[in-house]
């Protein structure tokens, strides 16, 4: 019997004193975190009898209510973790002579469990990185597959399948589905989307409750669910009464327990984006869309085995991508406590810099910069309220200088949507290589839409638009956005204030800018709503921040990606005094 490569790697190398930088779960919760004091005390008196096979009705109802839109308690079976669920579904669904397609790479149990049942298992590989949503099952062998096993959101890359299932029977390991890195982007469960589909979930990945060993099978195919119930009789039979009681409390309070994990993960993903920018000569990535893991590709000839061994020598476990058949990758978990995560990243950076550096390739992005001329009283008016109109204008000019510099690192072609009308000559001097397009009168939505319309008319291909309010944005995210637009209609970089710092699209989508309350905290949410209504495929980037007020300057001054022009301007009085707390 062959061991699963991932589990074997953990058994062999995750020592008790090692910090796990690869964890796919967040910092674990305790019983005290989940249960109110009185309920926790009452748990001591709970009878330790057998639990009904398939789980108690209350627990199944809680799973259905908290995780699905169209399922009820009778569509759920409780299992001893997701791995048991995969095994039970395989036993119930697969018969001799079947052909099974399994997403590759993926969790070992998805392919190994059907294979042990003696059926033919064929790998389904993405044609574009790990984007299975854009990869058709059109191979001659795969067309004959009776069932397709997938992990979505995908571990370890965090990509998500949202497209048409093509009438096939899908079994989806969806343990990462609740972990939406941008609010409003959670994918619909396959069991909700298709009556024949099977969704598998658990409490380990979203909440850090792996010790409960509580998972589930969800499907509206009642005949299949009954066969799964029989299969569970051959496995655990039922779950622990104590685990079931704690799981019920967790599911009834699911969103409140999940939210702190999500907030921490979003912040850590921003740290990871900075890390990738600082180490772009050694690593590359496509930021995850969901889940708590990112799959970093090592540049040059470096292998995950080499860097993982060096990290273990320093007390940190980093998962070698070879366990997924990707030897030049490593898995990083970012659902961890932020201070520990930051410290572990610093050590990771030390070890990366010991490897040979490789020049990052420049991706041919078409970049639109929307900007106002830096005139006192005209630009950065919120910032001016704290530092004065003259200083705000000087900072605005510095922000624009640094924004254009980061655009030049990735851009094939730069467009500047400028305002006011008489500033054309000034922008031509500032960026003689840029194509200049004027901003029309109107609100921000009108001006953004016009910028895209004019850029497309001038021959832009999948342009990415940024402003100058985020001058420390990692430059590599421009290239990442362009790459994501190969398989998505729209890409958005969410800003911490509820807006976005970046938007890209494959064709002009004016509806995305209609009826938005610009300047409010719901700009991103409204844009996502309009994208859903238009059935557009949307990808998101890590969160970043805008510099809108004097309070943002200290953070800006501490930013390791601070550009030359902004650094120089911040060092000047009186702005320098405001940033003094940052050590300038």
Image (cartoon, rainbow, N blue to C red):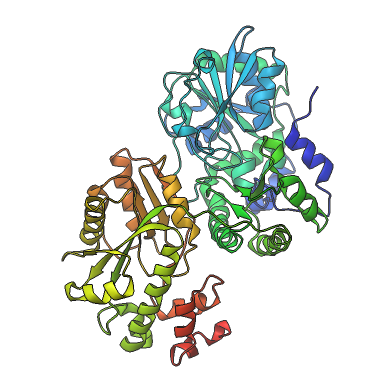
Residue 362 percent location from the top left of the image: 49, 55
414 or 278, nearer to the observer: 414
440 or 483, nearer to the observer: 483
407 or 253, nearer to the observer: 407
Tell whether 538 sits left or right of 475: left
Residue 77's place in the image compared with 560, above or below, is above
Tell whether 262 sits left or right of 53: left
Residue at 43% x, 70% y is 471
Tell whether 142 sits left or right of 415: right
Q: Quadrant of residue 101?
A: top right
Residue 316 percent location from the top left of the image: 77, 55
Residue 52 makes an appearance in the image: no
Residue at 47% x, 69% y is 472
Residue 555 percent location from the top left of the image: 51, 75
Residue 560 percent location from the top left of the image: 56, 72
Residue sticking out furthest to the top: 97
Tell whether 392 sits left or right of 278: left
Residue at 63% x, 23% y is 54
> Which quarter shows the C terminus?
bottom right
> Which quarter shows the N terminus?
top right
Residue sticking out furthest to the front: 433
Residue 171's place in the image compared with 306, above or below, is above
Residue 569 makes an appearance in the image: yes
Residue 95's place in the image compared with 569, above or below, is above
Residue 44's place in the image compared with 376, above or below, is above
């Amino acid at each position: 019997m062959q061991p699963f490569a991932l589990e074997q790697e953990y058994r062999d190398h995750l020592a008790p004193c090692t910090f796990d930088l690869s964890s796919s779960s967040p910092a674990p919760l305790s019983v005290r975190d989940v249960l109110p004091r009185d309920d926790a005390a009452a748990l001591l008196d709970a009878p330790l009898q057998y639990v009904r096979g398939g789980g108690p009705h209350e627990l199944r109802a809680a799973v259905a209510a908290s995780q699905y839109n169209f399922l009820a308690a009778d569509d759920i079976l409780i299992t001893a973790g997701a791995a048991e669920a995969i095994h039970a579904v395989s036993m119930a669904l697969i018969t001799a002579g079947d052909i099974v397609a399994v997403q590759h790479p993926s969790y070992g149990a998805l392919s190994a469990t059907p294979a042990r049942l003696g059926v033919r298992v064929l790998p389904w590989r993405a044609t574009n990185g790990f984007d299975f949503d854009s990869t058709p099952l059109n191979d001659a062998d795969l067309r004959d597959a009776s069932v397709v096993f997938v992990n979505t959101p995908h571990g370890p890359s965090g990509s998500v399948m949202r497209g048409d299932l093509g009438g096939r029977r899908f079994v989806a390991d969806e343990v990462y589905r609740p972990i939406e890195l941008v609010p409003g982007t959670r994918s619909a469960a396959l069991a909700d989307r298709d009556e024949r589909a099977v969704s598998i979930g658990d409490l380990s990945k979203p909440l850090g409750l792996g010790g409960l060993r509580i998972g589930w099978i969800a499907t509206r195919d009642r005949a299949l669910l009954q066969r799964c119930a029989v299969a569970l009789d051959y496995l655990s039979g039922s779950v622990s009464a104590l685990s079931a009681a704690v799981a019920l409390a967790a599911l009834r309070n699911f969103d409140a327990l999940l939210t702190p994990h999500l907030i921490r993960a979003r912040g850590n993903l921003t740290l990871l984006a900075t890390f990738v920018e600082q180490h772009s000569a050694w690593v590359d990535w496509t930021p995850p869309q969901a889940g708590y893991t990112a799959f970093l590709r090592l540049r040059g000839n470096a292998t995950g085995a080499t860097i993982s061994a060096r990290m273990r020598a320093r007390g940190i476990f980093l998962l070698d991508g070879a366990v997924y058949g990707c030897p030049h990758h490593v898995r990083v978990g970012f659902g961890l406590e932020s201070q520990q995560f930051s410290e572990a990243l610093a050590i990771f950076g030390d070890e990366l810099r010991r490897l040979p550096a490789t020049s990052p390739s420049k991706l041919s992005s078409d970049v639109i910069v929307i900007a106002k001329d830096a005139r006192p009283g005209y630009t950065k008016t919120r910032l001016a309220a704290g530092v004065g109109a003259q200083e705000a204008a000087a900072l605005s000019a510095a922000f624009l200088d640094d924004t254009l510099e980061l655009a030049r690192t990735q851009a094939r072609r730069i467009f500047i949507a400028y305002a006011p009308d008489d500033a054309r000559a000034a922008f031509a001097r500032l960026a003689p290589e840029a194509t200049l397009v004027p901003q029309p009168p109107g609100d921000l939505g009108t001006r953004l839409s016009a910028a895209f319309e004019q850029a497309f008319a001038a021959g832009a291909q999948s342009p990415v638009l940024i402003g100058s309010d985020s001058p420390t944005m990692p430059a590599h995210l421009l290239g990442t956005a362009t790459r994501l637009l190969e398989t998505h209609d729209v890409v958005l970089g969410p800003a911490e204030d509820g807006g976005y710092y970046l938007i890209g699209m494959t064709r002009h989508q004016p509806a995305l800018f209609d009826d938005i309350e610009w300047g409010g905290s719901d700009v991103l949410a409204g844009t996502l709503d309009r994208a859903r209504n238009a059935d557009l495929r949307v990808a998101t980037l890590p969160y970043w921040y805008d510099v809108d007020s004097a309070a943002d300057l200290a953070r800006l001054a501490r930013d390791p990606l601070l550009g030359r022009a902004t650094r120089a301007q911040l060092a000047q009085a009186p702005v320098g005094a405001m940033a003094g707390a940052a050590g300038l």
